[in-house]
Amino acid sequence: MQDFASIEWFVLAALCAATAAAAVWWLSPTPRRRGMGHDLLAADGRTDAVFLFDDNSLIGWSSGARKFIGDQAENFDWSMLRDQLARSYPGLPQSPGFLKDVGPLVLSGTAAAESREAHCEWIDGVTRVQLRRSTLEEQNKSLDQELTTLRAAVHQAPYPVWLQSEEGNVTWSNLAYDNLSQKIRGRNADFSDPLFTDLHDPMTSGKPERISIPLPESKKKLWYNVSTTETEAGWLCHAVDVNAVVDAEVAQRNFVQTLAKTFAQLSIGLAIFDRNRQLVLFNPVLIDLTALPANFLSSRPNLLTFFDRLRDQRMMPEPKSYSSWRHQMADLLEAAAEGRYQETWSLPSGSVYKVSGRPHPDGAIAFLFEDITAEVTLTRQFRSELEMGQSILDQMDEAIAVFASDGTMTFSNTAYGSLWQMDPEASFAKVSIMDASRVWQNTSAPTPAWGEIRDFVAGCDGREAWWSRVQLRDGTPLICKVSAIQNGATMVSFRTPETAALPACQERFPAITQG
């Protein structure tokens, strides 16, 4: 039994050793099959170099490949080969596995390539790259194919291409040029006579220049950007249709002119700054309001220069310091970009400007300058007159209250507040006729006069003036007069009988108030 077990262990050890040897041979950096590797490295007289890869690892190479590999044979891989060949052989795969999926590739080398072709293929797990020279017949065939492709590409190009001799004659043209010539001159025109008669500018500048062709029996023109290249056969010319661009420029120019005419009629100064914060549009009123010279505004100053000049001209409030001025400008710009800037400038000259900033499309900003001096002066004058009128009425002994047509109290004097012990200005809420009549009723003897006053203010009955005697709870007698004034308002006045004669209008409720 022990001998039999020993034999089994011996056989198992032999099998393991054989398997290990096969694995080492299979994973060897040389080709997996020496006969196959020899065949794959075999080359003809037109082969310059052969590379064999197992996945990304280099496992074999020909003598001609050594100048690419150098001393890096142990570390050389697919990515290193691609780095050297990709520029000369465009289209070399990123990974050898690509060839397994798509099949063999034949890549044509560029003018810088020493070999004319690179043959790449995947053979039984091995990737083979062969650099080889093509035969004269293959080269001629390739050149013929390339020439045919180039001719077709130029002839079918969507824009006119033509060759013009030094004498100015057209010696060759493509289909787009021929179609344009027929459209303008007809089918029987001399094709040697150039459509674009003056090519001096593009020939001299060496860059595209805009040239027009007049349409027959029309005032319209066709516009093209024409570029020229000098060759041994003459001047090779290209024309790109820019009619859409020209139409857009004309439309934009007309639109700007329309805006300028519209803005010229405004009484508000307008200054528009583009996304680079340069002045691109202003109206004549801005010159009058800011006293800035037209040549300065036409020079397209930036936003900070514009406001600096306003500050120098004393056309804006004087800042406390220059540093605070810069911070103020930064805040102004931010607020204008968000549409939040709106201020009233009181100038040293006494003028008052309303200035607002608004965002415009494409990052532009517009500033509006409005002279509101007259409006502010009128408002101040009106307020002064109101204050004077209030002061005069406050000096009167007669208590007066005025109610608007909607029943809210709009005015009262000092005597009214003292009489009824109320101050309408002490509360944000408006005092109504109901609120006032409730105070009157609570502090006086019963009388139907309060209800009549409420109806009078509401406009329910006739609006003829009347008066009535009322009496406070402390026994003080009062004469209450109700009168209609302008805009549907009502004035209610209270005085003692001793201060003046009785009103000339009709008296109401005489028997009730005298008891």
Image (cartoon, helix red, strand yellow):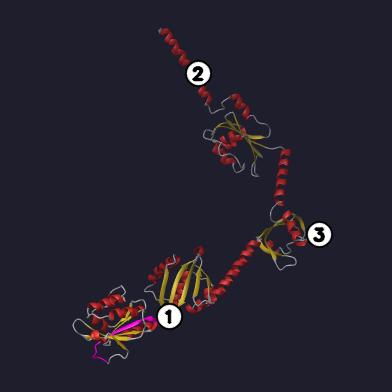
Q: Is residue 349 left or right of residue 60?
A: left
Between discs 2 and 3, the one toward the N terminus:
2
Q: Give the farthest residue toward the front.
A: 511
Circle 1 packing at 10 Å, graded few (<14), some (14-19), many (20+), is: few
Percent x, y for residue 335?
A: 42, 66
Q: Secondary structure at mark 3?
A: loop
The quarter in which the C terminus is drawn is bottom left
- Residue holding disc 1: 375
Between discs 1 and 2, the one toward the N terminus:
2
Q: Nearer the viewer, residue 164 or 255?
A: 255
> Does residue 174 appear in this view?
no
Q: Nearer the viewer, residue 120 or 266?
A: 266
Residues at discs 3 and 1 in contact (Cβ within 8 Å): no
Q: Is residue 189 left or right of residue 457?
A: right
Nearer to us of marks 2 and 3 is 3
- Residue type marked 2: Ala
Question: Is residue 494 covered in magenta?
Answer: yes
- Residue type marked 1: Glu
- Residue holding disc 3: 188
Q: Secondary structure at mark 1?
A: helix
> Does residue 379 appear in this view?
yes
Q: Is residue 352 left or right of residue 280?
A: left
**399 w.r.t. 362: above or below:** below
| First to last magenta residue range | 487-500
Q: Residue at x 50, y 72 (%)?
A: 271
- Residue type marked 3: Asn
Circle 3 packing at 10 Å, graded few (<14), some (14-19), many (20+), is: few
**199 w.r.t. 90: above or below:** below
Q: Is residue 41 left or right of residue 280?
A: right
Residue 18: assigned label? 2
Residues at discs 1 and 2 in contact (Cβ within 8 Å): no
**455 w.r.t. 82: above or below:** below
